[in-house]
Image (spheres, grey):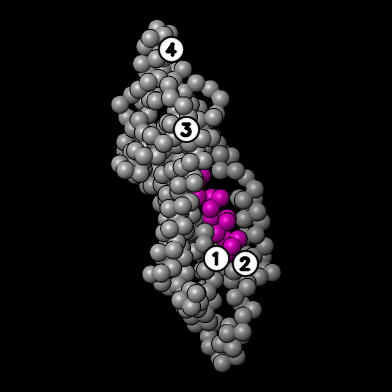
Amino acid sequence: MLRFIGKRLVYAIITLFLIATATFFLVAGAPGDPIAAKVGQMPEQAQEIISAKYGLDKPVFERYLIYMKRLITTGDFGESIIYTGKSANDVIKENTLISAKIGLIALVFQITIGICLGMISALNRGKPVDNIIRVLVVLAICIPSFVFAALLQYFLAFKWKLVPVFGWGELKHYILPVTAYALGGIASYTKYMRNSTLSVLSEDYVITAKAKGCSKGRVVRKHIFRNSLIPIITMIGPAVAGIFAGSFVIEKMFSIPGLGFYYMKSVSDNDYTMVIGLTIFFAMLFVASLIIVDILYGFVDPRIRVAKGRK
């Protein structure tokens, strides 16, 4: 297992290096002037000073070497062009927890409700409850999260005035964004849990357990539930990384000052150092989550752990 983890770490480093390189050159080659909003009507000499401060007066490849050297040696993602005196590292430190709170609460609802509904649907295949759940899942998957957000804002906030539309800091401010964020995920987990459970139900060990006279509850707990979770774990890995990034659209619609909000604003403002830094940070979370998923596989299904040990 240690050897396997070591290999994955090497692959992760190479992957992050390639992502950082590709992101830098894509952003550097994007149209638009990254300091146009900052310099405004400043004299030409002042504009040159600002360009030199951010290294924009140098060739792209030289800027890339300087950026990568600073990133590798100090872990500095660079100073924001729009927010004077604030770096991408500062934004990550100050705003990650905000996105994480919303994402984590939504993820807990997604996993628990999705797994329960998926199991109920699979164990009652072909019955009315299964048909109702499947219809609701299709609707929730097809409708984008920003549509849910708009509907929740209209009915719960504007029409019925039960919760505030915007704001942050109190418990009531979590209701709309968490609900809008969680609905699509609940549908996805329900769908995959149902399919996984149906697949496990046809396995020989489940049929054998039933033939031996095991009760339905014991078969579900000991054989079906645990083995049905393997595809769900695959989904949880990237989802855990996503709780820190949050939902870009959701945070923008509800004016939540999380990482997603700053990322969207950085893109619209051509704040290329912030875009590069946050993209690399999200990539680091995603790659780390995939490594954790591989490790969890071994605990959920010992056969996977043995197979990896033989490689």
Residue 247: percent from left, percent from top: 48, 42
Distance of label 4 from label 3 (alpha carbons): 27 Å
Q: CA distance from mark 1 to mark 2?
A: 9 Å
- Crowding at mark 4 (Cα within 10 Å: few <14, some 14-19, many 20+): few
Check whether the beta carbons of the residues at disc 1 and disc 2 lie within 8 A of each other.
yes
Residue at 45 percent across and 76 percent down: it is 309
Residue beneath label 1, please? 231
Q: CA distance from mark 1 to mark 4?
A: 52 Å
Upstream in sequence: badge 1 or badge 2: 2
Q: Residue furthest right?
A: 126
Residue in front for this viewpoint, 282 or 199? 282
The answer to whether residue 80 is visible is yes
For the point 41% across and 44% down, which residue is it?
281
Q: Is residue 195 above or below residue 82?
A: below
| Image label count | 4
Q: Tell me the CA gap for discs 2 and 4.
A: 57 Å
Circle nearer the N terminus (1, 4):
4
The magenta segment: 180-195
Residue type at mark 3 is: Phe
Residue bearing mark 4: 40
Quote the CA–CA distance across marks 2 and 3.
Answer: 49 Å
What residue sits right under mark 2 in the picture? Answer: 195
Q: CA distance from mark 1 to mark 3?
A: 42 Å
**Measured from the top left, where is residue 163 in percent x and y?**
43, 38
